Amino acid sequence: MNLAIVGLQWGDEGKGKIVDYLAPDFDINARYQGGSNAGHTVRFEGEKVIFHQVPCGVLNRNTLGVIGGGCVLDPKILLKEIGNLTKYDPAIRERIRISKFCHLIMPYHILIDEIREGTKQAIGTTKKGIGVAYEDKYGRTGLRVGDLYNVESFEDKLRLNISRKNLVLMDVYHAEPLSDSEIFDLYMKYAEELKPMVGDDTRIVHEAINSGKNVLFEGAQGAMLDIDYGTYPYVTSSHTIAGSIGIGLGIPPYTVERVVGVAKAYTTRVGQGPFPTEDSGDLGKLLRESGAEFGSTTGRPRRCGPFDAAVVRYAARISGVKEMILTKLDVLAGLEKLRIAVGYEAGDELDPFAAEHLLPRYIEVPGFKEDISHVRSRKDLPDNALNYIRTIEKETGIRVDHVSVGPERDAVVKM
Ligand code: IMP
């Protein structure tokens, strides 16, 4: 069975933990979009491990991690991440494959992203150069992992890119120009280090599927950050919905047999942009503190608010999600009443074009007092927690398959 895990909100739904939990049943764990903007957190051997580009199921020693061609790759961050992971498995490099089709994130992408975030163009990015790297990809001027191994042509393309970027840096942003020889030397060093891991993802995943192996597709960010179907322009620069999997790995769409959505038991968003159920008062503050809602890539405080069933209905529809995993339910313990947005004053369905002005229509259900972080069986969940889950199922039309009640791998309740 090939299964995809996708985010149903604005990212940070807890996909990392779920991928790590499911990985033992999969031979391959593949990322297909995004890059170092992602921060997938896993609790392993009592420690918090944050993944940015490496698929986070690789802590399981039988799982091969594939970084697909739809991703953008920052070699500096990747090599640091792999270096940290060798602490848990000294041979981790042997279980990581990087697609030669991945576009490289270059120092000028990061610099321009950072500069733009200080101007009127700011949308609250992670400043990892993601959007600028995807701009070059679609502008057909990008450099790919595979280009690193054709040194002469890489050098020519790099020089051309830097001369263009320096014009922008100096004339538009009044910044210092970059040195092409320094960047060339740096990327040649990265090329050597990456080489044993570089391959053709289309072949690796295709052959695995053909020989009956199981693939777990790991989405980054969430549906509402999708470049086309999210709250544009406050989105990331890749497709975060399930439709992106085939493209991001060079495999046919029908190979994705099941799509499981992950949604937090409340809603969060980091960065600017519309967020209909945002609570800027006590509830938002409480959720941020109890749920430790600070970005794992940037440390920024996340904006928080009640669960929005209309957002999840919309996200589930565009990704073909029929079942979901609800995370961080334990964070809601102690709240007297739990609010769920079931639609908006203007209508029941989410229209991303109108999201800025939507006023949520809430229903309220009783909260639960009990600490549920130790619960591992459905029968031990308090009635009010079960009622909250059932209400979410009713209002989203999506079955809740598992509930996560804490950061540890086993803190999961099967429903
Ligand atoms: P970028 O992907 O760095 O260009 O940022 C664009 C938007 O996506 C910003 O609002 C970011 O906060 C958001 N974003 C990007 N990656 C993540 C993520 O992994 N989790 C949550 N938000 C993200």
Image (cartoon, helix red, strand yellow):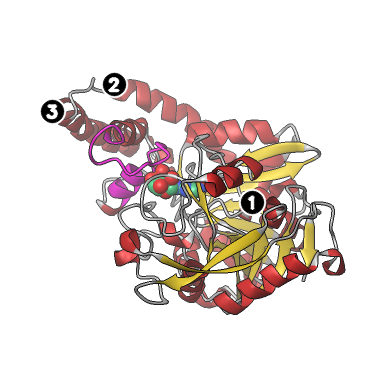
Residue nearest the viewer, comparing 356 with 264: 356
Give the foreground label among 3 and 1: 1
Residue type at mark 1?
A: Gly
Up/down of 411 relative to 229, above or below: above
Residue occupied by mark 2: 179
* Tally of numbered discs: 3
Q: Amino acid at mark 3?
A: Asp
Q: Which residue is mark 1?
A: 16
Q: Is residue 328 left or right of residue 247?
A: right
**Residue 99 in sight in this render:** no
Going 80% across and 52% down the picture, which residue do you hit? 371
Mark 2 near ligand 1 (CB under 8 Å)? no
Look at discs 3 and 2 and give the one toward the viewer: 3
Please name whichever residue, 36 or 314, is drawn nearer the observer in this view of the structure: 314
Which residues fall within the magenta stretch?
116-137
Where does residue 178 sit, x and y in percent of width and height?
Answer: 28, 23
Quadrant (top left, top right, bottom left, bottom right) of the N terminus: bottom right
Q: Name the residue tied to disc 3.
A: 171
- Tag 3's secondary structure? helix
Depth order, front residue of 351/2:
351
Q: Which mark is residue 276?
A: none
Q: For the residue carrying disc 2, how many other residues have a C-alpha within 10 Å: few (<14), some (14-19), or many (20+)?
A: few
